[in-house]
Image (cartoon, rainbow, N blue to C red):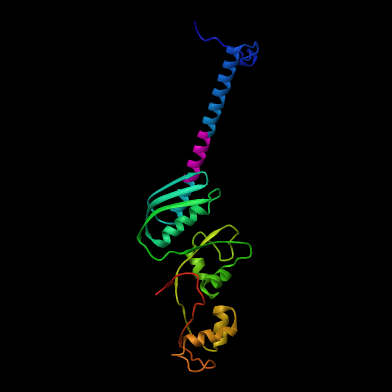
Amino acid sequence: MGLISFVKSAGRKIGLFGGREAAEAEAAVAEAKAAADAAAADAAEAAQDHAVAMDIRAAILSYVPVEELQVTFSGETAVISGTTSSQEDAEKAILVAGNTEGVGNVEDNLEVVEPKPPAVYHTVVEGDTLSGLSGRYYGVIRLYDVIFSANQPMLGHPDEIYPGQVLRIPPVATPTHTVCSGETLGTIAKHWYGEASRYQDIFAANTGVLSNPDSVEVGQVLTIPLIDPKVELLS
């Protein structure tokens, strides 16, 4: 008996001779081909989604420790689960997943051993800077280093942010400033707010320490008030 070979491109096309049976056969072949094509496409899409999920998982683990980390990806949604020791690690894991090309949503199923007040998330737009974001969210520009630190090691340099990137803006405690030689309330206000005229805000917050806005002493520790902060303040 053996195997008989044919040149499949030279065969008869279904339906060439007409008739109901031929038409039904042609429809069946077309349906079977469509189903096969759909199955192949579904399999390829599933493989691609799995590859993206594994890439996200590897990226998260390269930045933060997450126990029993599981990641799935479908459509544009990444789902992450596992256990982290801190709120900061959980939020960094979410950022790694969300800042991956093709990911439009992250479903966070992470458990945090020691939960703390959550950070605010900011999506970078053209013209944003870390000092500008510090001013917007904290009311002082000088806390840009807090934002930079909160997004390390994903951020390599304070100036290397790009539109569409999502950053975490963490809660902060009200900062203090130790007066150095040659400083005035005006220079201190310029340092923290970018405006020397804001010295009055510092004076008002330190009436128990300062008796005159024109006189500060080296070594004095001054409270730097956060003006209309958009994040929760730590005690």
Residue 63: give x, y in percent of width and height.
45, 56
Q: Quadrant of residue 116?
A: bottom left
Residue closest to the far top: 1
* Residue found 58% across the figure and 22% down from its top: 30
Residue 27 or residue 168, whichever sits in front: 27
Considering only vertical position in the picture, is 36 above or below 5? below
Compared with residue 209, is residue 91 higher up or lower down, i.e. above or below?
A: above
User: Which residue appears at 43% of the width and 57% of the height?
Assistant: 64
Location of residue 137 with respect to 178 vertically, above or below: above
Q: Main secondary structure of the magenta part?
A: helix
Q: Residue at x 49, y 57 (%)?
A: 95
Q: x, y percentage for residue 51?
A: 49, 42
Can residue 98 be seen?
yes
Viewer-closest of 2 and 47:
47
Q: Which residues are magenta?
A: 42-53
Image quadrant where one finds the C terminus: bottom left
* Residue 18 on image: x %, y %: 64, 12
Q: Can residue 183 be spotted in the picture?
A: no
Residue 37: image x %, image y %?
Answer: 56, 28
Residue furthest to the front in view is 20
**Residue 46 lies in the magenta stretch:** yes
